[in-house]
Image (cartoon, grey):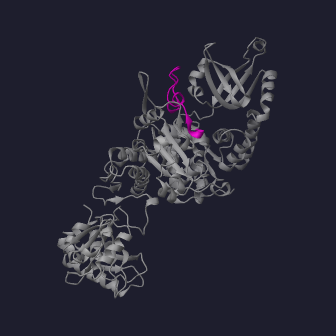
Amino acid sequence: MELDHLDQLAASAFDGYLVRKDLVRRYSRQYPVPTYVVEFLLGRYCATVNEQEIEEGLKVVERQLQDRTVRTSEQELFKARAREKGSVKLIDIVKARLDAKTDSFLVELPSLGIKDVRIDDALVNEHERMLTDGFYAEVSLTYDAAIADEKHSRPFAIDSLRAIQLSKSDVLETLRNGRQRFTTGEWRDFLLRSVGLEPTSLSERAKMVGLLRMVPFVERNFNLVELGPRGTGKSHLYQQISPYSHLISGGKATVAKMFVNMSTGQRGLVCLYDVVCFDEVSGISFDQKDGVNILKGFMAAGEFSRGKDSIRASGSLVMVGNFDVDVEQQQRVGHLLSPLPAEMRSDTAFMDRIHAYAPGWDFPKLKASEHLTDHFGLVTDYLSECWTNLREGTRISALQGRAHWGGALSGRDIEAVNKTISGLLKLMFPDPEMPIPNDDLETILRIALEARRRVKEQQKRCLKTEFRNTHFSYFMGLEGIEQFVSTPELHSDEAIEADPLPPGQIWTISPGAEGAPPSLYRVEATYGPGSGVKILNAPISPAFRESVRFGEQNLYTQAKRLVGDRDPRSHEFSVQLRAIDMEHSGDGLGLSVLLALSSALIERSIKGGLIVVGSLNLGGSVEMIPNPVAVAELAVEKGAAELLMPISARRQLLELSDEMATKINIVFYSDSADAFMKAVLE
């Protein structure tokens, strides 16, 4: 493997904390242990870019994996070694339980098939996680022949154990210092390589999904859902990368295992792990009827009541599952949370507790040769140790004075978006003192708003009356323009949507020239320093050139009424016409051009779902529309919610059928200033 720029950068920033990810895959397939166990050993002996040192380290790693991991047929061999030598070292999951008859703890070692290994109470108290589903550790197993002679004897005992996880105290300082050498894009790609993915083979959308998957590791009580096709590695991160994460396969869970065991007082998974992931979310079920209600309460407040006590816990919950159809079909037959269990899928209160919905359909089906990296990344036990330390505190103060939310976000929405932003900032800027460029902050804002809006859209499908307004927006700075964030699976550049378009953009219908049918267009205008209006289309149709000329002249003559004290003559405008239908002439769009120029100049959006119709002359008068009924029928066909028409078309529109009239709201205007006031977003 040749070192690329990112490898060399990583080697200079994180010497001693790197591992080649192709080596990890080589050994994790050969031995019955998770990836992070292999990386723990590789990180100990192969954390270098020096090929000779790597080769020497690999021999040690291979020997340890051969000597200390138990294959299916080797259980008796390990037991015999322990008997002959008095002790043996192995790597296994350590699970403990309290044996009430002897008032002592007993350990199960699954790979050896032994369920009654003695262990000292102090070791159990030091490593409480062994009392839930256990954790991987390097174990020193002893055998006492004298005890073996006794009836119902338990000759095996754990003399010492070392959890497979890093225990250095300065991990964050190293991470923060190393991060300083990377650009934001380089750091994101390096994080993806550190979890085994090759960023050069992933789209920008797939990289976003990859980052969202990491947020629960760094943010306390973060609730994430990801649904999508099979084979995209949704559960891999939660099973293979971190010892602080626990995967519940098949979705089966008990209240005692998840929260607290009432008979023993033992705390459950959400108390002992940073992340608890339900794999195959459609199968989530609890052994008690109130299990889902306890889960909802925990997702909302990070605490739950069992008996007299109210218990706080910081575990993040992740739910992953599969669509049996593609995302478009899923939206036609139900909603994007339909794969959840029956008691959750239409419960809008449950949905409200989901902080982010990652679009799993934007992540490719993983091919080892294409999507898994062969390059260097951080050793995952080091990375997971950094992540667990980053869980302390929040980074939302970085937004203070720099970003503000639009009116559509409720209190729960803001809380959810803030948690996602905090998590992404911890991942991308682990040093709180590191300056965050506006562009990077805005990108993170948009990811967080989209991930939460996806939840809101499913709530809207279940209960439209309560969740009508899903037009999430934000402002950068006090004087910033309101920017709207959509979810791409509901968005199309050629569809009229309820979301407002950016300032300077407007949907319009040309009545058609010389008997041609009406056709839909989008006019897009921007401005900068200079003067005049430049048309970006090539070639430019004479009819559209005339529409632009009429719109420009009316902007100059009516500037006071339309844009107040802003001087349009001191700006240069660029105008582009996008033809959605077959007709490309752009005839009779003078009013729409005028409104687009005015909207751009005052930086205010036109209402969502609105089509504006109107033709101007140089004097500013609005001309008659020859076929308003056909225009209204086309607006209905294109999915518009509202149609802005000149008052002169009112009588002719009485011929519009009742069916069509009920499908669209037609608003009339008297002149261009009235039209602009009714079109612009309040």
In this rendering, does residue 504 appear at all? Answer: no
> Number of marks in the image?
0
> In the rendered view, does 511 fall on the left or right side of 110?
left
- Asked if residue 469 lies in the magenta stretch, the reply is no
> In the rendered view, does 302 fall on the left or right side of 615?
right
Quarter of the picture containing the N terminus is bottom right
- Asked if residue 264 lies in the magenta stretch, the reply is yes
Please give the name of the residue rendered at 35% of the width and 59% of the height, measured from the top-left corner.
483
Residue 599 location in percent, x, y? 28, 69
Q: Residue furthest top?
A: 150
Give whichever of 45, 443 is nearer the camera: 443
Q: Quadrant of residue 554?
A: bottom left
Quarter of the picture containing the C terminus is bottom left
> Please, is residue 679 above or below residue 545 in the view?
above
Please give the name of the residue rendered at 77% of the width and 12% of the height, measured from the top-left corner.
146
Instruction: Tell me which segment is drawn in magenta.
Output: 248-272
Residue 328 location in percent, x, y? 50, 59
> Please, is residue 154 above or below residue 559 in the view?
above
> Please, is residue 155 above or below residue 337 in the view?
above
Residue 193 location in percent, x, y? 59, 51
Q: Quadrant of residue 114?
A: top right
Give whichever of 599, 332 is nearer the camera: 332
Give whichever of 324, 427 is nearer the camera: 324
Residue 71 location in percent, x, y? 76, 36
In this rendering, does residue 33 appear at all? Answer: yes
Q: Quadrant of residue 634?
A: bottom left
